[in-house]
């Protein structure tokens, strides 16, 4: 059944630095992971502004049980560090988000963004080369025109497959604050980009202007108490999008009602539990990610300690709440002190919306089966990932006597955080980014 | 832990032989912890000398936390008593927290990266609640104070600088927190401006006392830049251009 599926993830493919912690460089830290619409391609972005795309091998008919493995397909530098001379501040090249466009021809397109600039990249294959030019030699040097005595027609010859990435559009200068989200519309022509205070709507063909559709900047910045943390278009209704806030609220907006969507159509907020109120209540309620289900009926939000599933028809409270690491509730002050409380975890749905996944600390990640209400904690680490063995469920000991194989809360490594995970849109294949390593797990059971 | 409504220890008037120690014990642990949280939050809001723009979401959340503490302390009446002149347990309260914070600062010189650098900087395993002893205090408090330009006395110690904060904060009403986000229509890096009063043309905000605090340690790419004075910084930018 479905329960087994979560416990049988195996066949890890690991990409990343082979060295230990000392060899880890900041630039390698993966900052975003995203499957494309078919799941054949998996893109990662890192702190150094690089994008690495993995491609799934075609399944071999002679080996029907072989898994389609992922291998590196293309690597390119998407963003470079910039210096804003006016403010004397560096603009980081870190890739905050990658979103694929639906495929329309042989080439693949994706949007990648850092804090300030969004770029549209075209990734195309070249397996033929033209030879026999008239005006230049084979090595590209120009020929002396006077030496040319005859004309020839260049012919196409096969060559080793080359994957090229070229920037097709650069959408810049539209964000004063840091971009946290981009989302492609279901019309496949427009997309939104959101920063801390504003959301802009772009047309993919037009780079010199965008429409501002949400602006929560107060007239007097002294009154600023809330920021936008994530935004996403509805998967099917091209006029609808949602955005989440640092106060744990979600607003659903309909672009048909007005050009500037400062008035929301729906407002989702769970009433606070007065018994658990503390000085950290607001911080842990801040939503770090919001994702629509594939069906479009639900959306999921991630706050510091939990994942919540909301029915779009019910604004008063979520329909499901899943605890990710409730044992951290008693450690909030320490986590505030070392800034872990500000970590932004993402979350994702599986293809059928029956399961959800999110990351935690100590290289743990959590999966929740919505149908059976079962959940499991798994670990992404080289030590615990043998090629053919299933991932062993992990358990954190929250108090009392620690059982064998359990880990106590105080032993958790808060440097090892899994912020980014992705689920194949159809199959049971998951990608988990653990600092500078990418783990791809496949389901044993067909 | 910090839940409101948490019953506090009854503060009696003890005349034990232990003296100060007994006084410490009778000080409400809740007040102490709340004070530590306030101190920690104010340190976290220090943004000077960071070459990369700080995270607005984080700043807003920390500022809201400070505001909450302020409001509660105002309701308690304890906000008023955090004054140098006040007698009673309040100075003891403050003395403990700032002294331990100082110790933490000097112990941590050169050891820890700045708060707020996001993923990538080292964080040890979480220990039990011990907020005062492991605050990520800025490096080189002495040298930075001297290197910063501007009309300012040579304050010297971190200890004194925190006093400065409380003096300035207590003279204002609780809504002074709004000043942190003053400067209409400017990006939030001006929070930096208000807090440190470093950059030319900065509005003299109520938190000017914070400029006495050493800057938070900057990111790895700018470790040399952090110690430059303002003028040097400007010259460097011109040269790089």
Image: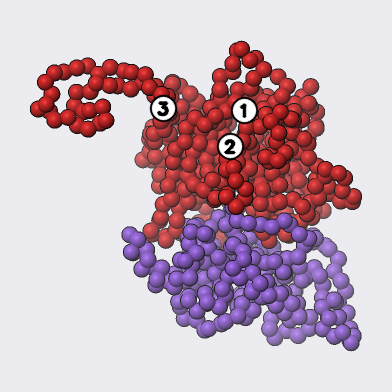
Q: Which residue is mark 1?
A: A424
**Residue A203 visible here:** no
Tell me the red chain. Answer: A
Could you say which disc has been placed on residue A15 in the image?
A: 2
With respect to residue B163, does B183 lie above or below? above
Tell me the purple chain. Answer: B
Say whether disc 3 or disc 2 marks the residue closer to the N-terminus.
Answer: 2
Separation of marks 3 and 2 at Cα, in angstroms: 21 Å
Chain where mark 2 sits: A
Choose top left, top right, bottom left or bottom right for residue B25: bottom right
Please indicate whether residue A44 sits to the left or right of residue A172 in the image. right
Separation of marks 1 and 2 at Cα, in angstroms: 17 Å
What residue is at 41 percent from the left and 33 percent from the top?
A: A165
What residue is at 19 percent from the left and 23 percent from the top?
A: A134
Say whether disc 1 or disc 3 marks the residue closer to the N-terminus.
Answer: 3
In the depicted view, which residue is nearer to us: B97 or A206? B97
With respect to residue A55, does A376 lie above or below? below
Residue placed furthest toward the top: A62
Are labels 3 and 2 on one chain?
yes
């Amino acid at each position: 059944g479905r329960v087994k599926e979560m416990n049988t993830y195996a066949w890890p493919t690991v990409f990343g630095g082979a060295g230990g912690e000392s060899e880890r460089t900041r630039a390698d830290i993966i900052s975003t992971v995203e499957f494309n619409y078919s799941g054949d391609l998996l893109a990662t972005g890192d702190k150094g502004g690089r994008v690495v795309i993995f491609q799934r091998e075609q399944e071999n008919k002679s080996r029907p049980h072989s898994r389609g493995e992922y291998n590196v397909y293309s690597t390119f530098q998407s963003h470079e560090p910039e210096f804003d001379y006016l403010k004397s501040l560096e603009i980081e090249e870190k890739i905050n988000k990658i979103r694929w466009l639906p495929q329309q021809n042989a080439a693949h397109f994706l949007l990648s963004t850092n804090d300030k600039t969004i770029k549209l990249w075209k990734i195309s294959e070249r397996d033929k080369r033209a030879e026999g030019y008239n005006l230049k030699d084979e090595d590209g040097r120009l020929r002396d025109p006077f030496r040319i005595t005859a004309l020839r027609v260049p012919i196409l010859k096969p060559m080793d497959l080359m994957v090229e990435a070229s920037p097709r559009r650069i959408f810049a200068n539209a964000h004063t604050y840091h971009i946290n989200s981009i989302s492609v519309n279901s019309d496949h022509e427009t997309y939104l980009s959101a920063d801390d205070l504003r959301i802009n709507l772009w047309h993919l063909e037009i780079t010199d202007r965008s429409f501002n559709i949400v602006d929560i900047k107060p007239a007097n910045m002294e009154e600023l108490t809330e920021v936008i943390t994530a935004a996403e278009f509805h998967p099917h209704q091209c006029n609808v999008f949602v955005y989440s806030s640092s106060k744990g609220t979600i607003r659903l907006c309909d672009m048909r009602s007005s050009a500037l969507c400062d008035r929301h159509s729906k407002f989702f907020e769970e009433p606070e539990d007065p018994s658990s109120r503390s000085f950290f209540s607001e911080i842990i309620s801040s939503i770090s990610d919001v994702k629509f289900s594939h069906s479009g009926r639900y959306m999921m939000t991630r706050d510091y300690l939990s994942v919540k599933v909301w029915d779009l028809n019910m604004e008063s409270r979520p329909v499901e709440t899943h605890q990710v690491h409730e044992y951290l509730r008693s450690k909030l002050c320490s986590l505030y002190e070392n800034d872990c409380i500000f970590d932004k975890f993402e979350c994702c749905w599986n293809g059928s919306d029956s399961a959800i996944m999110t990351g935690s600390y100590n290289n743990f990640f959590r999966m929740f089966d919505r149908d059976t209400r079962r959940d499991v904690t798994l670990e992404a680490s080289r030590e615990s990932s043998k090629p053919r063995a299933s991932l062993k469920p992990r358990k954190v000991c929250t108090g009392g006597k620690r059982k064998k194989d359990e880990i106590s809360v105080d032993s958790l490594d808060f440097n090892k955080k899994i912020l980014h995970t992705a689920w194949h849109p159809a199959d049971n294949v998951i990608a988990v980014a653990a600092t500078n390593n990418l783990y791809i797990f496949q389901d044993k059971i067909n | 832990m910090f839940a409101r409504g948490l019953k506090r220890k009854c503060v009696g008037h003890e005349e034990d032989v232990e003296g100060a120690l007994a006084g410490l014990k009778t000080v409400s642990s809740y007040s102490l912890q709340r004070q530590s949280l306030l101190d920690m939050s104010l340190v976290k809001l220090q943004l000077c000398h960071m070459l990369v723009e700080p995270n607005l979401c984080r700043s807003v959340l920390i500022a809201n936390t400070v505001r909450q503490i302020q409001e509660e302390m105002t309701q308690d009446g304890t906000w008023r008593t955090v004054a140098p002149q006040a007698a009673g347990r309040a100075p003891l309260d403050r003395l403990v927290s700032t002294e331990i914070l100082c110790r933490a600062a000097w112990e941590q010189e050169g050891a820890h990266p700045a708060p707020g650098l996001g993923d990538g900087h080292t964080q040890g395993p979480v220990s039990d609640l011990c907020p005062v002893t492991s605050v990520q205090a800025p490096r080189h408090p002495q040298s930075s104070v001297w290197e910063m330009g501007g009309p300012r006395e040579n304050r010297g110690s971190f200890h004194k600088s925190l006093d400065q904060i409380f003096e300035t904060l207590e003279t204002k009403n609780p809504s002074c927190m709004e000043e942190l986000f003053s400067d209409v229509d400017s990006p939030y890096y001006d929070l930096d401006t208000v807090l440190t009063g470093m950059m030319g043309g900065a509005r003299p905000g109520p938190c000017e006392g914070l400029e006495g605090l050493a800057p938070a340690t900057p990111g790895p790419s700018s470790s040399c830049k952090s110690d430059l004075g303002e003028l040097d910084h400007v010259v460097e930018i011109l040269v790089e251009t």
